Amino acid sequence: MQWNRSVVTRRRGFGLALLAGAAANACGDPTGAQSEYAAARARWRNTAPSAYEVTVGMSCFCLSSNGATILVRDRAIVSGRDPVTGVALARADADRYPTVERLFADIAAALGNSESRVDAEYDVTYGFPRRAYIDHRVHWTDDEVGYFLSGFHPR
């Protein structure tokens, strides 16, 4: 039986490519979530204003509200208000909502935990998370949190 050398070489190359792909998925970033996070975080570091206003909505079993429009200055919440009624929120109520920086930290922590699942979408201009779904423990119930950021305005 004669072997066609080019077919054997292509098959070997294909097998090596499959093996390399499997290895990358086993210990790399199979969903691209970490690389998307890193790119968005870098974009935020380069474009983040020192002050901004953003409306943060949360979906979880931990909080029931209309969300909050928060004013952030130097990475800290200065004030918050109900985005529907416009009524000012008590400081403790406003602090329950994450700043962009805190949301990045929460996403990073979840990405570093093999028991977590993260699904996020980032703003193309500033890089902040426009939407983030974090399931801290995929085998637990009711620990998931969804964040929705809108109305971002540098101040």
Image (tube, helix red, strand yellow):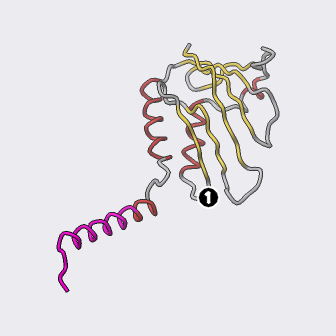
Q: Residue at x 44, y 60 (%)?
A: 25
User: Is 55 displayed left or right of 43 in the figure?
Assistant: right
In the image, residue 151 sits, relative to residue 115, either above or below, namely: above
User: Is 113 displayed left or right of 87 in the figure?
Assistant: left
Q: Residue at x 46, y 53 (%)?
A: 29
Instruction: Verify whether residue 10 appears in magenta.
Output: yes
Residue 109 screen position, x and y as percent: 57, 48
- Most foreground residue, 120 or 43: 120
Q: Residue at x 72, y 34 (%)?
A: 58
Residue 151 screen position, x and y as percent: 63, 19
Locate the N terminus and report the quarter of the image it occupies. Answer: bottom left
For residue 82, which quarter of the picture?
A: top right
- Most foreground residue, 16 or 47: 16
Name the kind of residue labelled 1 in the image.
Answer: Glu
Q: Which residue is mark 1?
A: 115
Locate the C terminus and report the quarter of the image it occupies. Answer: top right
Instruction: Verify whether residue 70 appears in magenta.
Output: no
